[in-house]
């Protein structure tokens, strides 16, 4: 008796809490010469998408942004529409891809996302879940698991767990976190993923999704589609077409992290810096922040900065006031925004 071949498009759901390293891992997947043609759907919590600036696009992948809400609730209809559009274009020969990777926002509960592939008839016909891959931040993971239901759900529903930032944590603490993760989800292997360095064989085409196991975690998985976020967590976007003074900006961010770092769950942006012919891409989680050179500004391109801040009850007006003081040519000291 021969086994039937599933001709549906395999889907990998890439999840993990804010700043865990999902986009870094996705870059690793796109860079690897694995032979797969991948369509990427990325969802960001907030009105402005930054990750498309961070993602490598050397391999000409189809990348679709969803940044008008969380993929697991308000924009689930958009997910259905985008998947349907991708499938139709593939059938017409307009797009060439063999699988889909969905990068969820760090605040997404993976259950409603996975439900889409069982309750939407057109999606069931064309797609199948290959696996839910969850990235856990070794530095901040224990606190996130203590404080956020979404982080717990991301671990509980995972078919594979990848542990990032292990170099920032003593080995005994890493092992304690691994033991906790295995207690929460004994069926998911836990492996390191230093700067996204994970074996693609542990991520793609692993046929890891097990509906029976999911129903064991959540018996109402196929029925309950409700999901709400913690009202304390919100996001806002800051935009400015004027170039920034880098020294002032670094000083102000240092003050922000000292004052609000514990509540700054995730922040990232694209910066237009005076005297620089390349944009600067910055990312941060709590007190940890990094910045790298991005793509050069094209000749005649309108330069501007876009920043996204996600956190618990962050004082938006104060942030905006201080950032405005960091614009090149401004005489004001941005520290005054915090002093006032």
Image: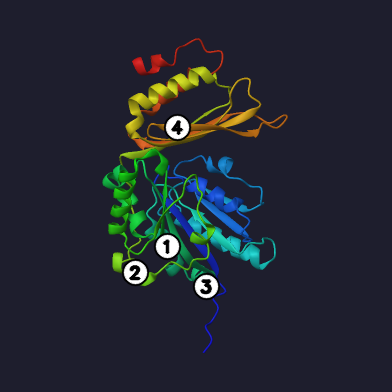
Asked if labels 2 and 1 touch by Cβ distance under 8 angstroms, the answer is no
> For mark 3, what is the residue?
125
**Relative to residue 91, is residue 265 drawn left or right?**
left
- Mark found first going from the N terminus, 3 or 2: 3
Helix, strand or loop at mark 1: helix
Q: Point out which mark residue 289 bears.
A: 4
The quadrant where residue 186 appears: bottom left
Q: In which quarter of the image is the C terminus?
A: top left
- Mark found first going from the N terminus, 4 or 3: 3
Residue at the front extreme of this rendering: 171
Q: Residues within 10 Å of mark 2 (few under 14, many from 20)?
A: few
Tell me how far mark 1 sits from mark 3, CA to CA: 15 Å
- Mark found first going from the N terminus, 4 or 2: 2
Helix, strand or loop at mark 2: helix
Q: Point out which mark residue 114 bears.
A: 1
The quadrant where residue 328 appears: top right
């Amino acid at each position: 008796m021969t086994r039937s071949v599933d001709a549906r498009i395999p889907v990998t759901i890439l999840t993990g809490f804010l700043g865990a390293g999902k986009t870094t891992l996705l870059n690793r997947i796109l860079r690897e010469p694995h032979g797969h043609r991948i369509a990427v759907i990325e969802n960001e919590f907030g009105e402005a998408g930054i990750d498309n600036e961070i993602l490598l696009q050397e391999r000409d992948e189809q990348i679709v942004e969803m940044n008008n809400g969380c993929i697991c609730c308000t924009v689930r209809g958009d997910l259905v529409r985008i998947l349907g559009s991708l499938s139709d274009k593939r059938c017409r020969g307009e797009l060439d891809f063999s699988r889909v990777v969905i990068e969820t926002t760090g605040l997404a509960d993976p259950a409603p996302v996975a439900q889409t592939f069982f309750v939407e008839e057109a999606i069931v016909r064309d797609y199948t879940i290959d696996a839910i891959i969850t990235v856990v931040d070794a530095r901040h993971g224990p606190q996130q698991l203590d404080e956020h239901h979404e982080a717990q759900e991301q671990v509980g529903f995972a078919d594979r767990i990848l542990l990032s930032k292990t170099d920032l944590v003593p080995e005994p603490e890493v092992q304690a976190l691994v033991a906790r993760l295995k207690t929460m989800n004994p069926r998911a292997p836990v492996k390191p993923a230093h700067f996204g360095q994970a074996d693609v064989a542990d991520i793609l085409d692993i046929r890891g999704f097990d509906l029976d196991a999911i129903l064991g975690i959540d018996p109402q998985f196929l029925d309950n589609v409700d999901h709400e976020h913690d009202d304390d967590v919100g996001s806002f976007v800051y935009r400015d077409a004027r170039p920034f003074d880098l020294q002032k900006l670094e000083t102000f961010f240092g003050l922000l992290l000292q004052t609000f770092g514990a509540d700054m769950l995730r922040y990232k942006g694209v910066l237009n810096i005076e005297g620089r012919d390349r944009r600067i891409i910055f990312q941060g989680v709590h007190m940890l922040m990094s910045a790298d050179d991005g793509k050069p500004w094209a000749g005649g391109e309108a330069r501007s900065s876009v920043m996204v801040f996600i956190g618990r009850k962050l004082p938006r007006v104060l942030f905006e006031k201080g950032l405005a003081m960091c614009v090149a040519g401004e005489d004001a000291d941005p520290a005054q925004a915090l002093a006032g």
